[in-house]
Structure formats: structure tokens, C-alpha cells
């Protein structure tokens, strides 16, 4: 089954390049997403056998992120059907620059989108750190053409920045993988990078080499995750990509890089170097939140605002696992809540961009009157992403703060609350101003496919704040235990 999860979207992506009908291509996209989701559900309910010399397997961490990625991809695929229909053959002009641009062919977009799903599934299911590294690199190659969808000069610049910085990061991660192999060279004649072998040999690891490996892998995968100061590709890529892609970059791809870091953290914990690794994650996390806060205050571009919000929330995840204990559970719950919320907000941002033809927040007013469905979702999304009750993000952030206080880290809890307060004020100034006021023009009602997918995501993130379904709760606790939580 695990191999099928990777192969099905890869084959569908290859097929998509050859199809002549756009309708058939869109049907293939949704059918593949639904098939992947059905397989992910089956993987949740059962225990798929490891495959490829045990290099591919699903543990509780993998099961959590697989379900999340598959769900988000299915919802965005449904949204993409309407989006691609609206964008078909469209030649647009840039309001700030005097030239026209035309989107890449739909075959390339759909094919790369499905290959992107296949690559993310490879990362999530890989138990071999070398294969995981290859999967992370594959996500970069598959998603780069998606960022360049509009073939605008800004999207080209964003694509190159994404390719260069993430390639540099992945090169550092490769160096970290070599260091990890060296750290464990004295413990066995085997040079296996299979996670189970690494965990078994870790207690006898060479500590300096292991610490050097963790630093390189944190820097390398942290670049892909968007942790500051390694985040420079993220605001450009997320703001210039079409909203469907932005939703997947923020809601799914960043989680893949986070999972890669968690795999290395597991090795450090087994080697008795958990405190060293957690402290690094903690301060990277707080620095990311502080960096995001600076850029979120008076941010004039609402898509860049959402992008910097992703930097903030990746920082919160790092703080959670950096604290350990209950913080692990809070971080994993926050990964789920953030993915659903950010996916919703980027899809709604796509509706706003379609109606107003601008990403300048100052030129968007009266959403609640001019574009009511998106206006309501935008307001709800602001409350959710800012960690307001009763949404799931409030519950997860509250859990992380409670973990900091419970572990005797009041400075961390205080710094986190202060930064969350600054970010709340900065985002409310921009996002609520867009929702209220008088609309300059009355826009046509959004199509059903532009509203239903974000409504589904909004309902799920609201549900998480009120009630966590037992299967998800069990998986969250088991996954947190794999990171050393005593629950």
C-alpha cells in the first residue's frame, strides 16, 4: 500500500502531461487526490507492511502527516478545478507594470501538482534518511514550475530564489547526513541510514560528530521549513505562486521539512543528546516568531502577510518540540491546525485576488459587503490564524504555553505570549481593515468551487478547537510519545 501511495500520483502526473483534454486532466487530478485520500484512510485504519527493504514504512508521525497532506491536497484539488477553468487561456496585464503575461500550460501545472504530491508522500513514508533527503529535493523540483505558473517576472524571480536557497539548504542537509554516518561509524560495521538502525546504534554515537550532524540537518531542512533566518525564499514563493500552490506550500510542504527535522531529533534523543537538540530548536523557534512579528506589522501585501505568518507558525512548532514533554503534543496539534487554517486563508486570498486584481491590502476594502462569502471566511481565518478561541490554533498554542510554564520556562512562555500579542495586533490592522469598510464595487458572487473548499477547512479547524476526534487524538499522543513525551 505504501508504494501505491507514491506511485499512483506519480503515474497520474506523467499521464497528465500527455492528455489533450483539460476536462479530462482536471478529472484525473480530483480522482487521483480522492484515491490518495482513500489509501491514506486505509493506512490510518490498518498497519501497512513496510516495503523496499523497510526503507518505506508508516509510524505514528508518518501517519499523522500523511493524513493531513492527503486531506489538504484533496480539498485544494477540488478548488483547483474551478481555478483552472477561470484561468484557462487567460492573458493578464500587470497593474503596476506595463506588460502582459500568460500562464504556463495546464498540462504542466497539473502534472507537476501530482508529482509534488508523490514527492511529499515519499518524504513522509521514508524511514531511510538518504531516501528522505532525495524526497525533499524532489519536492523542490516538482514545485518550482508551480511557483512560476503566471510566467510573470516576479514569479520567475521567486522561483529562482526558491531553487537556489532550497538547493543550498539541501546541500547542507546532505553534509549533515554524512556527519551522521560518521558519528555512528564506530558502533557498527553497517553504514545504514535506516531510522530503526540509527536509533539502535545511537547510544554509542560520537557526540561531537552527532551534534555537527544535527546542526547541519537543522540548517538544511530548516531552510525548507522556513525557520528564520533561513526563510528568505518563503515570502516571495508563497506570494507569487497561485493560491492553490501557496496553500500546499504552506500547509503541506513545510510539514514535510518539519518531519525531516523530527526524524533527526529522534536520533539525538536516542543518543542522549535531546537537551542539546531541543535548545537549538527552541531558540530557532523564538527567533522565527520575532522575525515574523517585525514583518507582519504594517505588511502592505496580504499574500506576503500570510507567508510571514507561516514563518511565525513554523517557529511555534519549533518552540513546542524544543520544550519537549507536553510541548510535543501541542506542536503536533498545531501542525494540524495551522495547515488547515493556512490552506483556507490562501484559497480565500485567491478569491480576493480574482475579484480585486491586486495583492495590495490597502486597495481591498469592504470584503464583508462586496464579497460576502470570502469576507466571512477571511475574518474567521484571521481569528483562527491569530490563535483566538474556539479554533484549534488556540488550543494548540495554549498547550505549548502551558508546557513552557509546567517545565519551569516562564521566560519562554512570556516571550511567546508577547510575540503572539504583537503579531495579533499587526495582522488585525491589515486583515480586519480589508474585511470592513465600503466596497468600491459590487463583485459577482463567488462560484461554489471557490467557496466550498475553504468552508470545509474552516469547519475542520473550528472542530479541532471544540472536539478532537478519538482516532486523531490517539495518533497525536502516540506521535508525541515518539518524540519523548511521557504520556
Image (spheres, rainbow, N blue to C red):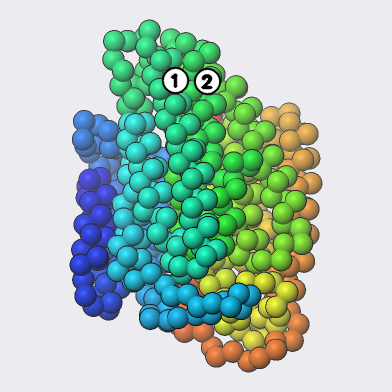
Front residue of 339/166: it is 166
Residue at which label 2 appears = 212
The mark found on residue 179 in the picture is 1
Label 1 element class: helix
Looking at the picture, how far across and down is residue 395, in whole percent? 63, 51
* Picture mark count: 2
Q: Residues within 10 Å of mark 2 (few under 14, many from 20)?
A: some
In depth, the one of 154 and 473 nearer the eye is: 154
Q: Residue at x 50, y 78 (%)?
A: 100
Residue at the image position 52 percent from the left and 65 percent from the top: 153
Lateral position of residue 87 relative to residue 107, left or right: right
Image: 474 above or below 107: above
Using the rendered image of the protein, determine whether residue 374 is visible from the camera's viewpoint: no
**Residue 225 appears in the figure:** yes
Q: Position of residue 378 (x, y in %)?
A: 62, 71
Residue 291's spot in the image, x, y percent?
70, 46
Instruction: Please tell me whether residue 74 is drawn above or below residue 276 in the rendered image.
Output: below
Quarter where residue 91 is shown: bottom left
Say which residue appears at 49% left-offset and 23% top-offset.
Answer: 213
Mark 1 and mark 2: span between their CA atoms?
7 Å
Instruction: Using a 10 Å C-alpha cutoff, classify the residue at mark 1 as few (fewer than 14 neighbours), some (14 to 19) or many (20 or more).
Output: many
Callouts 1 and 2 close, C-beta under 8 Å = yes
Amino acid at each position: 500500500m505504501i508504494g501505491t501511495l507514491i506511485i499512483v500520483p506519480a503515474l497520474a502526473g506523467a499521464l497528465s502531461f500527455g492528455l489533450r483534454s483539460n476536462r479530462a486532466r482536471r478529472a484525473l487530478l480530483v480522482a487521483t487526490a480522492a484515491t490518495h485520500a482513500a489509501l491514506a484512510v486505509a493506512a490510518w485504519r490498518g498497519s501497512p507492511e513496510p516495503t523496499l527493504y523497510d526503507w518505506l514504512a508508516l509510524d505514528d508521525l508518518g501517519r499523522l502527516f500523511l493524513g493531513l497532506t492527503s486531506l489538504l491536497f484533496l480539498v485544494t484539488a477540488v478548488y483547483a478545478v474551478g481555478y483552472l477553468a477561470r484561468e484557462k487561456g487567460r492573458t493578464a496585464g500587470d497593474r503596476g507594470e506595463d506588460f502582459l503575461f500568460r500562464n504556463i500550460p495546464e498540462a504542466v501545472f497539473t502534472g507537476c501538482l501530482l508529482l509534488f504530491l508523490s514527492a511529499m508522500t515519499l518524504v513522509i513514508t521514508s524511514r531511510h534518511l538518504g531516501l528522505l533527503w532525495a524526497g525533499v529535493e524532489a519536492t523542490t523540483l516538482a514545485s518550482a514550475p508551480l511557483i512560476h505558473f503566471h510566467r510573470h517576472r516576479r514569479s520567475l524571480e521567486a522561483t529562482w530564489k526558491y531553487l537556489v536557497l532550497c538547493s543550498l539548504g539541501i546541500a547542507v542537509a546532505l553534509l549533515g547526513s554524512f556527519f551522521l554516518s560518521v558519528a555512528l561509524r564506530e558502533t557498527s560495521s553497517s553504514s545504514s541510514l535506516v531510522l530503526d538502525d540509527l536509533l539502535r546504534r545511537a547510544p554509542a554515537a560520537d557526540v561531537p560528530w552527532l551534534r555537527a550532524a544535527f546542526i547541519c540537518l537543522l540548517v538544511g531542512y530548516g531552510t525548507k521549513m522556513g525557520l528564520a533566518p533561513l526563510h528568505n525564499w518563503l515570502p516571495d514563493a508563497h506570494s507569487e505562486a497561485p493560491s492553490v500552490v501557496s496553500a500546499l506550500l504552506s500547509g503541506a510542504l513545510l510539514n514535510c521539512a518539519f518531519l525531516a527535522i523530527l526524524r533527526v531529533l529522534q536520533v539525538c534523543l536516542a543518543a542522549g543528546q535531546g537537551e542539546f537538540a531541543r535548545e537549538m530548536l527552541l531558540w530557532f523557534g523564538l527567533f522565527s516568531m520575532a522575525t515574523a512579528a517585525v514583518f507582519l506589522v504594517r505588511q502592505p501585501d496580504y499574500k506576503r502577510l500570510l507567508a510571514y505568518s507561516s514563518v511565525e507558525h513554523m517557529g511555534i512548532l519549533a518552540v513546542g518540540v524544543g520544550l519537549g514533554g507536553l510541548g510535543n503534543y501541542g506542536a503536533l496539534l498545531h501542525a494540524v491546525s495551522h495547515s488547515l487554517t493556512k490552506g483556507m486563508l490562501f484559497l480565500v486570498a485567491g478569491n480576493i485576488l480574482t475579484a480585486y486584481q491586486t495583492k495590495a491590502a490597502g486597495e481591498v476594502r469592504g470584503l464583508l459587503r462586496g464579497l460576502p462569502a470570502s469576507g466571512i471566511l477571511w475574518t474567521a481565518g484571521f481569528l483562527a490564524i491569530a490563535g483566538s478561541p474556539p479554533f484549534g490554533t488556540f488550543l494548540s498554542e495554549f498547550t505549548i504555553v502551558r508546557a513552557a510554564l509546567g517545565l519551569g520556562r516562564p521566560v519562554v512562555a512570556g516571550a511567546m505570549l508577547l510575540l503572539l500579542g504583537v503579531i495579533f495586533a499587526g495582522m488585525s490592522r491589515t486583515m480586519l481593515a480589508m474585511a470592513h469598510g465600503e466596497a468600491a464595487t459590487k463583485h459577482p458572487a463567488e462560484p461554489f468551487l471557490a467557496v466550498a473548499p475553504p468552508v470545509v477547512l474552516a469547519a475542520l479547524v473550528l472542530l479541532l478547537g471544540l472536539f478532537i476526534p478519538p482516532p486523531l487524538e490517539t495518533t497525536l499522543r502516540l506521535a508525541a510519545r515518539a518524540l519523548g513525551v511521557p504520556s
